[in-house]
Structure formats: C-alpha cells, structure tokens
Image (spheres, rainbow, N blue to C red):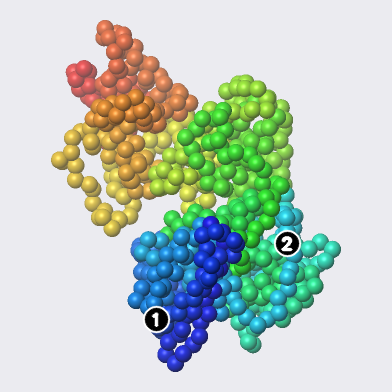
Amino acid sequence: MNESATLNVRVTEQTFTDRYDYELRADGTDGDSPPLEMEYTVEVDRALVSGCRDRIDDALTKASAWGPNPEPGLLRELAKWGKLLHEQLFPRVQGNTAELVTRLYASTGPVLVRTNKQDVPWELLHDGDNFLGLKLDLGRRLVGRRAVVSGRGVSRVGRALIVGDTLGDLPSAREEVARVAAWLGSRGIECKVMLGPQATKLDVVTELASEEAPYDLFHFCGHVATGSGTTGLMLHNRQLLGEVALQTLSSTGAPPVTFINGCASAGEGGLANICMSFMALGSKTVVGTRTEVADDGAWQFASEFYGRLLAGESAGAAVRAARGALRGRPDAAWASFILYGNPAAGIAKDATAGDEPSLRERPEDDLPIALAPDAQRLMRRVRASAADRSAIASVDLLQGLLGEADIRQRIEESIGADALEAFDQLIQEVLSRSSATENGDLGPVGVPVLSDTVNRVLEEASALASADGRSTTTTADITAAFVAVGGGISSRLLELCGVPLSLLLPDSARTTSGPDTTDSGTADRDQDPRGTANPADTAASDTATSNGGERLPMDDLSRDTMGVLRLANLLAKTRGEVIGTYTLLLAFGAMGSETLRLGMHEQGPAGERAYRRLSRMLTPRRRDLSLRVHDVLDQARRRTAADGVPSGPVGEAAILLALLEDENSSGRELIRKLGVDPELLIQALGRAR
C-alpha cells in the first residue's frame, strides 16, 4: 500500500478470552489494494495481553525512576514482552493472519489503529525485527459513543498555551515549561505560560475557550489523575480539568495540536481518556504518554516532535522520527509516547521554520558533519546573526547558544537578569562593529563562512557525537565542544561579565580543570584533574566498573601499544566516559601508528587521505600551547639543528631536555615531586642522545 491505511480492531469480551476482529482498509484509491477488504478473526488470551502490557509499563516506570543510569537490558525486555504480545495478537496458527501481518508491514504510508480497546500498547508490538511504532507512522483513534466536535484546521502554529507545575511540586515540569516556551518563542510563536496559582481551572478553560485569539497548540506537563469518577489534568488547588469542563470548548474547539506529558497516577487508561476528550472537542493531533517520562527525555521528545511538525511533516512521521531520535537514551523515554489522531494529519510548513539547508548542504563549509534537528535550528540562529557580515564568528555561536533556554537560565541564575541583559547588549555591540571574524575577511557579504574557531568547535562536536555512537551532532555536543576549545574571543566577553565558560555546560558536565594557557611556573596546572599533587598516587579510576577497578595488565603489550592505550584513556577521561573503539582508533592515528598507516596505504588514495585526516585530528594548534611550551619546542629544534641534523625530526630527548633545563617550568617541578632529581635526569637524557 502506498497510501494511508486504517487497521480496524474490534474487541469482544468472552468468558475467558477476547475475540479480535481485524480489518485492514486502504484509505485511498491505491491500485494495489484488493477489491474487497478481508476481515480476520483471532481468539486472544486476555490475561496474557494484560500481563505483557503490565510488564512493559513496569519496565518503563522503573527506567524513568532510575534516571540516566537504569539497569542494562531495558530494550531487550521491552522487545521480549512486545514480541510475546505480537505473537498473541497475530498468531500464525489461526486462520490467515499471516497475510494480515504481511500487508500491515508492507504499508509505506501512515497507519491508523482504530479500536474500542485502549489498553493494548500497539506501538510496542515487536515482530522479531523492530517495534511497530518505529517501523510505521502509527496513530490511534478510540471508537466510542460520544459526540465529536469537528474542530478547526490550522495552516501554521501562531499561538501556544503552555501549562505546567500547577501544584508547585514538580520543578522538572516548570523547567519543561520554560524550555518549550523559549523554543516556540524563538520561532515566532506567541506563547502564554501558566504556572502554579495562575493555572486555575477557570483561568485555563477561559484561555482555551478564547474566540478572539484561539490557541493552535496546548502543551501540558504535570499530574494526570482520577478522582470522583473523573480523569483529567490536575490544575491549581487540585482541580481536575476533565471532559465535562472541556465541554466549554464545544463552540470554539480545542487547540488542533495538544501535547500532554502527564505524571500519571491515572495510568494509561486514564491518560487515554483525557487525550480522547481533547480529540472529541476538536484536537486533530494529541500526544500523550503511557507512563511517567524522565524530565530530559520528555523535553527532547517534544522538541523533536514540534520541530518536525512545524517543518511540515505529518504527525505520524514526526512522532516516529522523535522516537527514533531518542531510542539511544537509556531510560527508553521514546517508548512511552502515544499519538492519538490520524497519523497523516499535519500542518502547513511553518513560515518561521525557513527553507535553509542543513550545515552540511552548504557548499562553502565542506564539513563532514551531520546535524540533529536541534543543532540545525541552533545553526539557523547563528547564520541569521551573521547574515550581514562576511563570516560566522565565535560570538555569533555564543549568541546562538544563549538562545537555548537551559543555558540562558544557568547564566541568569549566576549573574542576574540585569547583568544578562547588559551582556546581550555587549554582544550586540561587538557584532554591530564587526565586519569579519577572528581570522580576518573570509568572503563576500551574503555568503558567510565559518571562522577557524567555529570550524574547530564543529569538528570537535562531531567527534563527541561519533564517540557516543551517534551519526548526528546535537546542540549539547556543540556546547561541550565550544567550552573545550576555549570559546575564541567569546571567552573574553564572558570574562568581562564574570561568567566562567564552563557555566554553559550543565552541572553534571562541568570539570574544575581548564586549559594550560599561562604556565606560570607553579606545579598546580600539571596536577592530576582530581587535584592531588602526586599524579602517580591517583592514577586509579575513581570508581570501579563492572570490569574491575584494578589496573589493566600491560606486560604483554608493546611500548607503542601502551602509549596508544594511555592516550585513549586520557581522551576518554576528559569526556567523562570509558574508552570506546572510536577513541582507541583516534589514539592510534594520533600516535602515528605505522601499522595503521601501512594498512590504510593499501586501500589506495582514499585510505591515504583518511589516514592523514585521522593523524591530524588531535594535532594541537599554536594557540593550544602555552608560551613556555613554544619555547621548549623552539629550543629542541635548535638543539637538533646544532647536532648537525637541520631538517631531521626532533626527538623525545631533545624536547625533554629543553623542558627540564627550564628551572621555572612546572614540568621540572613535577619530576621533583615524583622523587627524581631533575639534574640527574638531564644527565641521563644527554647520554641517551
């Protein structure tokens, strides 16, 4: 089938089992559709279906409670119960359901599951290969006997009502409200925010029922509960906004797009009821959750979904893409979201979304980097900042990062709203006076290119994403890379306003150590990152992993291999992760592995180019070295030339001698702290040459 389809599922309860009647109907006039729609009947064990559903919900609830480090194997557990459920609902031994399954999975368009049974997790059925919600653009519609308001269509999202933390007990909901409002606001969407005491039932209903300026989007994050036979959104003073209260919207219609992130004490059934209530009152697209979702997962899903929906994708495609983008999260947040409504529904491409190509599509940048949707939106803001100048500078990138709600909030909490406003004005003044980047005039106005600093940031961000096993670079990667490379001239602006560069990062990603830029002569800058004076005493890992906390045996490794592993360990520690295969290969390239070079050489010109690129990835730039280290290298070159090898390679001994002969260097002080006389070491190195 090349068009949208509807899977009608009618469930009839029997004594101990349920009868499922399926009908798969093509919604269009596809020539491949059969002339008659066939109905398939299956007898299903009710207890098995409810048991699988409960195990899935339990797994998702535990994953959310565990936070960012849940027990391993969550996806395998979801797949196990999803596969068992799939086999029960579509058994191969009853009738010709195999044909139904074949036709269902052959669908290339969106599929609407229209059913009178709301507690089956259709999205998480697993066919042994993948989950149904990741294979198809899937939506649900529940069949009932309630009257339905046709509602209104929307060509673009112009106004949004955002309600959350109505009881004042969910800081994460308050943060989600701020993020969503900032994200939508940056796209020209007018946002009304209602928090705590502002979100009474009367006030929320009054806003939703407004005829003068109706809302196109409603976003709720808070409690969903059941009380006195009513399921609804819990508002201020524990008032429930349910179907009866929503009847007030019968003339104006509910917002066409509704997103409910519910910390549900009502369970999926209750949440489904309130989602269906919005649909009955005219909402075309409603997204809800099966179980409570981890804070950051809910926000990431919402941003992915909204970004694609505003860009013109159908609701089903937007939800499936958001699931796919979050699939790598350990809390499996993607698995909780459900689309109620026709998956083929959507809105016209939002005028604020722009038609700009992604960064890798720009011919002037020639960067091997793919951007996630959030990073694409960041770079749109950055390019807009540099539209009237010749190049994109680090200040443009900083201004773009300040448009991220979480970063802006951290800085405001640190220096205050007034100081942040002054900082914004300072950036604008710098940009208004600038006609080029740190590297000079790089191109004609109207075709801005990337400054050297921004290029380095994006290259490092791409490396961070690859090290994490991801093919696209996110805003978080770009932020971490911006801090790692020092921020260019932007760091000076931050210093003027008393903002440390590390404040751009979330608390969990900050470190207390920074780049060695002055080499003042003290040993502090060469101490172990944990702050201990003797690195030899603190080389062990802070925490033992499941592989053991003891040192890795290296007696059977060559000296070159040991060097590669130690470099990989250093790279991994700076990123707060264990050594992965990406980092290990990067270390081989950085160490100039002759074995790797010969192997790549056999692959022809492409292999040689790849090796050159790999071997240069960690090569420092001049600005990455302190003045004292520059002096050490110059002295080593002069020493090598004096030995009669003017064009020969500078060896280790020449560099070590130059380093140790500087009596004020922190390197010499480190040798002394390790219990070795620097002068005796100099004599030994001199003999080795």
Viewer-proximal residue, 250 or 624? 250
User: Label 1 belongs to which residue?
Assistant: 48
User: Label 2 belongs to which residue?
Assistant: 153
Residue at the limit of the structure toward the right, as seen here: 212
Q: Is residue 264 visible?
A: no
* Residue sitting at x 53%, y 70%: 36
Among the 4 quarters of the image, the one containing residue 72: bottom left
Amino acid type indicated by mark 2: Gly
Q: Is residue 661 above or below residue 582?
A: above
Amino acid type indicated by mark 1: Leu
Relative image position of residue 353 (x, y in whole percent): 67, 46
Viewer-proximal residue, 287 or 96? 96
73 to the left or right of 425: left
Quadrant in which the C terminus appears: top left
205 to the left or right of 343: right
551 to the left or right of 329: left
Q: Is residue 428 visible?
A: yes
- Mark toward the start of the polypeptide (1 vs 2): 1
